[in-house]
Image: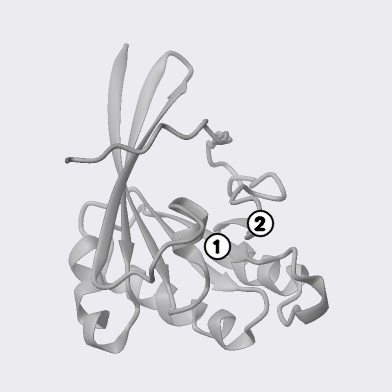
């Protein structure tokens, strides 16, 4: 079976809950950059995602473009309960267009959609932001760490749905 490696970068402002989507729910905030891999089988082919999780803290801000060069995709995450994190989407897209490859796939993920009482960013507004840049859009629930809706690929694009895999037992070096 063929193995295809794809580099993905997660981008966001501090405090959107992005690390909890991908990693464990009760972790310390990302400082600098974290890395993980995820292998998924799709149509008789293995896809190994090499996922870089960048910190948006001011002192690490200049490091993010270092990861853009070989990217297949970038996921920009914002917090549905903090409008200011949604406002920075345009800055992320601009940065990706300047430093990333021309054919990079972009996804926008609104996190914490299950916190309805304090929601500040409406789903329609996020879709209106994603459509003109041909980005995939999804909302995630902080309590489940899985997409709450199916992410539709941009028109003409090919996509596949990632399914949550059972957790592997935690290992220790000691």
| Secondary element at tag 2 | loop
Q: Which residue is the site of mark 2?
A: 143
Q: Label 1, secondary structure: give it.
A: strand
> Looking at the picture, how far across and down is residue 55, in whole percent?
32, 73
Please state which of the two labelled residues, at mark 1 or mark 2, is closer to the viewer. Answer: 2
Does the image show residue 68?
Answer: no
Q: Is residue 30 visible?
A: yes
Quadrant of the image for the N terminus? top left
Q: Position of residue 68 (x, y in %)?
A: 25, 62
Residue for point 53% across, 36% down: 158
Residue 36, labelled with which disc? none
- Which residue is at 29% across, 28% downward? 4
Location of residue 19 by image quarter: bottom left
Residue at 32% x, 83% y: name it: 57
Instruction: Name the residue tied to disc 1.
Output: 108
| Left or right, residue 17 beside residue 51 | right
């Amino acid at each position: 079976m063929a193995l295809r490696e794809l580099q993905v970068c997660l981008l966001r402002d501090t405090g959107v809950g992005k690390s909890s989507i991908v990693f464990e729910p009760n972790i310390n905030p990302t400082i600098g950059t974290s890395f993980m891999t995820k292998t998924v089988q799709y149509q008789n082919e293995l896809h190994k995602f090499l996922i870089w999780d960048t910190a948006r803290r001011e002192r690490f801000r200049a490091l993010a473009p270092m990861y853009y060069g070989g990217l297949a995709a970038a996921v920009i995450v914002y917090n549905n309960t903090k409008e200011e994190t949604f406002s920075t989407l345009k800055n992320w897209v601009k940065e990706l267009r300047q430093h990333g490859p021309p054919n990079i796939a972009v996804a926008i993920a609104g996190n914490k959609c299950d916190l309805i009482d304090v929601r500040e960013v409406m789903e329609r507004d996020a879709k209106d932001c994603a459509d003109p840049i041909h980005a995939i859009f999804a909302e995630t629930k902080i309590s489940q760490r899985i997409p709450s809706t199916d992410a539709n690929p941009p028109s003409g694009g090919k996509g596949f749905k990632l399914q949550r895999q059972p957790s592997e037992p935690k290992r220790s070096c000691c």
